[in-house]
Amino acid sequence: MPALIKHISKFGQRTLRNSSIRMGLDQESSFFGPLKMEDELLGQIVSIFQTVVSWVAAGAMVFGGVVPYVPQYRDIRRTQNAEGFSTYVCLVLLVANILRILFRFGRYFETLLLWQSFIMIATMLIMLNLCTNVRVAAELNTKRRSFLATDCKDEEVRLPKRLFLDLDWSYFWLWSRFLDYMQCVLAFTLVAAYVTYVLLDSALYVETLGFLAVFIEAMLGTPQLYCNYQNKSTEGMSIKMVLMWTSGDTFKTGYFLLTQAPVQFWICGLLQVFVDITILLQVYYYSRYPQKPVSHTVSHTTSAKAL
């Protein structure tokens, strides 16, 4: 009997000990449970935020290069004057992005940059189509006015056709039809693709191709820089476009550095930012110290200055 009482006493003590442990665990879980839920919720919010930021950055990389040309396109359509925009900017970007696409066959880089090249090529072709139509219409109107001044009949007004297939370098990239620009781009693409196919196993050629692609793009602003210098003015050039160039190139160069892109990419990105800043200095200089009087023929384009 005493042994039974002793066994019952030990069993009761063990039961009390287990229940107290369970109560302690329940209290601990009731205390730390909300904290764990808050940590999980915070982790989900951070994950969603990172996803949104990555999508925004991806969209900025793909479409950010196109945005600067929207105000320039609208200005040209509104004023029907393309004198302030150098179409050699389109040439530079077309060559650079075609070479970049071919470079990817020899060395992998992010798919976002590949899509950026395709979209930029389409944008430059749209800009070329507009500028060609506006320039030809302006030349036709000028010639028509001169013929009317000499009492010639309007149906005699004809513009000399300048075609790509004439292979006359004196008016290279100044052709009369958009079709000729398409023929030139297609011919360059086929020749470059064939050379790349033959030399794809050469590491030297592949690296040179990548360098040329980004270096030519880095020279994007130089045609506009030279055009402004020749005109001694930035009239007709959309300053919004140049400001967007600068911000976009700065973002792009930072993206190259963060994603550890090939060294050619970020070196030429820095060069591109330098050219953009130089054009902005031209805007300041020519507005502060005008080199020539504003002509009446282009005075209606002053609203294109967006500062």
Image: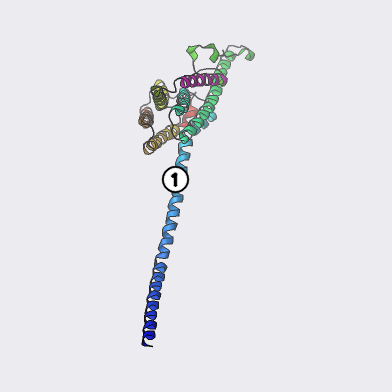
Q: How many marks?
A: 1
Q: Residue furthest bottom?
A: 1
Whether residue 307 appears in this view of the structure is no
Whether residue 204 appears in this view of the structure is yes
In this picture, is 275 found above or below 164? below
Q: Position of residue 25 (x, y in %)?
A: 39, 69
Q: Position of residue 124 (x, y in %)?
A: 50, 27
In this picture, is 153 found above or below 246? above
Q: Position of residue 9 (x, y in %)?
A: 37, 83
Label 1 amino acid? Answer: Val
Helix, strand or loop at mark 1:
helix
The residue lying at 52 percent from left, 27 percent from top is 127
> In which quarter of the view is residue 212 placed?
top left
In this picture, is 150 found above or below 221? above
Q: Nearer the viewer, residue 171 or 304?
A: 171
Q: Quadrant of the C terminus?
A: top left
Residue designated by label 1: 53
> In which quarter of the view is residue 249 placed?
top left
Q: Which residues are magenta?
A: 179-198
Q: Position of residue 113 (x, y in %)?
A: 46, 33
Q: Is residue 194 magenta?
A: yes
For the stretch drawn in magenta, the main secondary structure is: helix
Q: Nearer the viewer, residue 16 or 87?
A: 16
The residue lying at 39 percent from left, 79 percent from top is 11
**157 sits to left or right of 201:** right
Q: Is residue 36 magenta?
A: no
The residue lying at 42 percent from left, 60 percent from top is 38
Q: Quadrant of the N terminus?
A: bottom left
Disc 1 crowd rating (10 Å Cα; few below 14, some 14-19, many 20+) is few
According to the image, what is the colour scheme of the structure?
rainbow
